[in-house]
Image (tube, rainbow, N blue to C red):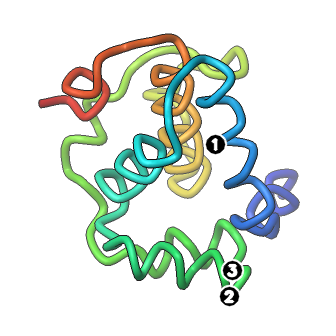
Amino acid sequence: MANTRVYKMKFSSVYPLYIQKAEKKGRTKEEVDEIIRWLTGYGQEELESQIEKEVDFETFFAEAPRLNPNRELIKGVICGVRVEEIEDPLMREIRYLDKLIDELAKGKAMEKILRS
């Protein structure tokens, strides 16, 4: 499976890139963390623990306490692919996160990003 490289990437190596992308556009690390917590159900301490343990994406999502049921409301294109059409469940979760970070960087209001 071609996606296994992505699944084995350490979440802790991509996390700073999410923050960097957000901060370049005037957003904050706290907003990135809020998005991740909303999507996965991790508390802040649990999120920090996952980062410290250097888990891969596969483990990060497998151990997520409670994937938000509203994540299925996330629609749109990321990397040229419609997220709602991604068949592989783990890749869809990863792309949901990418899409939310993109929306943050594009200046969308947090209420809309979190599908409130």
- The quadrant in which residue 4 appears is bottom right
Helix, strand or loop at label 3? It is loop
Dot 3 amino acid type? Val
Which numbered disc flags the more N-terminal residue, 1 or 2?
Answer: 1
Depth check, mark 3 against mark 1: the one in front is 1
Relative horizontal placement of residue 69, taking residue 105 as reference (left or right):
left
Q: Using the numbered discs, state the Cα–Cα distance from disc 1 to disc 2 in whole angstroms.
A: 18 Å
Dot 1 amino acid type? Ile
Depth check, mark 2 against mark 3: the one in front is 2
> For mark 1, does the 10 Å Cα neighbourhood hold few (<14), some (14 to 19), or many (20 or more) residues?
some
Q: Quadrant of the C terminus?
A: top left
Q: Percent position (x, y) of residue 26?
A: 55, 20
How many labels, in total?
3
Q: Is residue 62 above or below residue 33?
A: below
Residue underneath mark 2: 53
Relative horizontal placement of residue 51, taking residue 112 as reference (left or right):
right
Residue 46 numbered mark, or none? none
Residue underneath mark 1: 19
Dot 2 amino acid type? Lys
Closer to the camera in the image, 81 or 98: 98
Residue 55 numbered mark, or none? 3
The residue positioned 37% from the left and 14% from the top of the image is 108
Which numbered disc flags the more N-terminal residue, 3 or 1?
Answer: 1
> Mark 2 touching mark 3, by CB under 8 A?
yes
Q: Using the numbered discs, state the Cα–Cα distance from disc 3 to disc 1 in whole angstroms.
A: 18 Å
**Residue pushed farthest left?**
116
Q: Percent position (x, y) of residue 46?
A: 42, 81
Q: Using the numbered discs, state the Cα–Cα distance from disc 2 to disc 3 in whole angstroms.
A: 6 Å
The residue positioned 57% from the left and 80% from the top of the image is 50
Helix, strand or loop at label 2? It is loop
